[in-house]
Image (cartoon, rainbow, N blue to C red):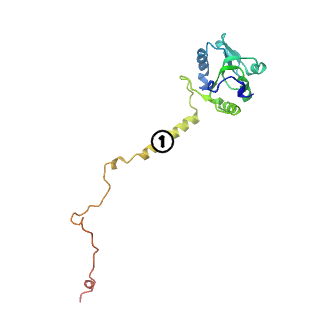
Amino acid sequence: MSLNTTSVKRQNHRVHPCSLKQKRALLKSLLEKYKESTVFVVTTDDLDEFNDIINENVTIISDKKITDSSELQCDVLISYNLPENAEDYMARLSCPKKEALILLDTDEQKQLHAIERVIGRSLIQEIVIGFEPAKTLSEQKRDFKNKRYNDTKSKSSKPYRDNEHKKPYSKPVNSSTSTQKRQPRTINVKSLKPSP
């Protein structure tokens, strides 16, 4: 199945990175935003876990139900988590008419890369204010190395403060000889003979 079979525009197919702890709160926030639309929340987890968010506009659905019924339609599809198989995600894209959103935690990056390879482009990532993802250990190390590099680079480019206002070193010149060219010294050879 190709992306061309969906009616979701590229700018309406987005990824919302967040930490695993924030994922459920972000889902509730998005459902509040889309309360006037029909929303499918697709998950690979236990469906009973989401009973508290179901209402007349929100349906919790599994990948199996989507693949079994090709007639399912909604305005907004929210992928609570990603399937292991990129083709299962492509089946999800047959449902939404307006928007497709992914709630992505750091453990699901590998699945996202597989989906982007199948689609043939990267998906727009948009961080929702208040749900910023926590940095992974590798990102923290990278930021620390970049900070250290930038600090040392900025220190080495600054001039040494003690020498800022000093003039460059020059040898003092005698005022009487300053206008004259210095002549080489000549030695009288006769004067070097030993005396009798």
Which residue is at the far top?
Answer: 56
Q: How many marks?
A: 1
The answer to whether residue 84 is visible is: no
Residue 73 appears in which quarter of the rendering?
top right
Residue 12 appears in which quarter of the rendering?
top right
Circle 1 residues within 10 Å: few <14, some 14–19, many ≥20: few
Q: Position of residue 54 (x, y in %)?
A: 66, 12
Q: Residue at x 49, y 39 (%)?
A: 147
Closest to the observer, 83 or 136: 83
The answer to whether 45 is drawn above or below residue 153 in the figure is above
Q: Position of residue 44 (x, y in %)?
A: 71, 22
Which residue is labeled 1 in the image? 150
Q: Position of residue 30 (x, y in %)?
A: 60, 18
Q: Residue at x 31, y 48 (%)?
A: 165
* Relative side of 172 to 102, left or right: left
Which residue is at the far right?
Answer: 68
Residue 34 appears in which quarter of the rendering?
top right
Q: Residue at x 71, y 32 (%)?
A: 118
The answer to whether residue 154 is visible is: yes
Which residue is at the far left?
Answer: 176
Question: Amino acid type of disc 1?
Answer: Asn
* Relative side of 5 to 20, left or right: right
* Relative side of 81 to 162, left or right: right
Dot 1: what SS?
helix
* Relative side of 89 to 27, left or right: right
Closest to the observer, 110 or 68: 68
The answer to whether 57 is drawn above or below residue 158 in the figure is above
Q: Tell me the quadrant of the picture where the N terminus can be found.
A: top right
Q: Position of residue 167 (x, y in %)?
A: 31, 53
Q: Tell me the quadrant of the picture where the C terminus can be found.
A: bottom left
Closest to the observer, 170 or 6: 6
